[in-house]
Image: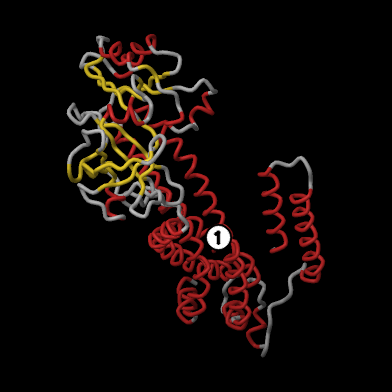
Amino acid sequence: MLRVALKGLARRKLRAVLTAVAVVLGVAMISGTFILTDTIESAFDTVFTVAYKKTDVVISGKSAITESEQENEHESGLPAFSESLLARVRALPGVAEAQGSIQDRAQLVGRNGKVISTGGAPGLAYSVHASGNQRFNPLELVRGTWPVGPNEVAIDANTAERDHYIVGDDIGVIARGAEQHMRIAGIAKIGGVSSLGGATMAIFNFPVAQRLFDKVGKLDSISVADSNSYSPAQVVDEIAPILPVNARVRTGQAEARKKTEMTGEILSVIRDFLLAFAGIALFVGSFVIANTLSITIAQRTRELATLRTLGATRKQVLRSVMLEAFVIGVGASVIGLFLGLGLAKGLNSVFVSLGIDLPQAATVFATRTIIVSLLVGIVITVLAALRPAIRATRVPPIAAVREGAVLPAGRFARYGPQMALFTIGCGVAVMLVGLLASSLSTGSRLLGLGLGAVGVFL
């Protein structure tokens, strides 16, 4: 029966390919979604890992609001704390080195007088200690030097390339108040990622950053390196008692992990949105598969009856049809899996065209992506083929000698119109509940609309 199934596929190449297309598209959407979001998440993870690579402990501002609300605030929204804390931290026995910094928001202004921005991406601002130790500096200088004077700034490499800026050019900067024109002293990037997406970076010398953002005598964060005899956790315990109420302390790894988790929550929304479309594609595809196989089986009535006449059992006929579906599912899922690589780049281009330019790193092709894509594609194909395969087992051997023999009607065939009307009625009712019922959450309304639409489609 294995040989029969494979020969059957070989004779109907075009129909097999057309059946597979529905699965290919759905699996490609799943694969592309996972590849895109995993790559973006990896980029964010790399940014934060690099930022705290040589930092054992981080002290940052803390809001007076609840912890959950606090975690959703941007760094620049948190209150700065007194610079006097830096001297007290440096005096602790577990601290080998400590350095304060400023992180805020600043916008770069292009030659046309407009703010350089892509899709509302933030304008990030950082301070550097140009003449000091660069141990805690997560940025890499690509060209030029770090800014020193009050009218100097370094910008990110993406902006420099996209808007054709070089070292020595003037660029507008809006920090607090009116726009200021500064000379570009250097061009920098965050190591490990090919792009920060649409975000821009303005980098100032530390005292200049304090003045620009009205934070003279204040700090947004302190990076700490522990001494060899102390662990980061011990240094955290040592620093905690001397912190003011508007500051908090974490290990560098914990800080990087927390920021990665926060971006992961945002990416999960994008992932769920795209996977919903993949689910719709596979849902529709399952009907295409079922209908195509039903037509194929109806056309093969005499062939299947001949197999029964030659001694094939109903189970063997069932296995033969299911094997055809399995082969189609495997082939289509493998093609869809690798097609997802191209689709991921296409989806990213769509996001960029819509103004949603997200950080990029090396493409991530995770094991989970492979397993889920193949499993979903194969299972959907096999399940969609189950009903036509069962119908194939009902072909009587006598049909082999009858001209124009057709598949026998199922036991419930006469109830088809009634069942269809009942399903449509239930689907419409659920949709109306989702639309019109009061005191329902947004999630419940969307669920009702989705289930209702599925019912109507069925």
Q: Position of residue 21 (x, y in %)?
A: 50, 70
What amino acid type should be assigned to the residue bearing mark 1?
A: Ile
Query: Which of the 4 image quadrants contains residue 420?
Result: bottom right
- Give the left or right position of residue 373, taking residue 423 as reference: left
**Residue 341 seen:** yes
Front one among 346 and 408? 346
Horizontal and vertical percent for residue 428?
Answer: 77, 58
Task: List the residue tagged with mark 1.
Answer: 380
Horizontal side of 439 relative to 358 (left or right) equals right
137 relative to 32, above or below: above
Residue 5: percent from the left, percent from the top? 49, 73
In front of the other: 124 or 97: 124
Corner quadrant of residue 235: top left
Residue 367 makes an appearance in the image: no
Q: Quadrant of the C terminus?
A: bottom right
Of 208 and 94, which appears nearest the observer? 208
Is 323 left, or right, of 367 in this rendering? Answer: right
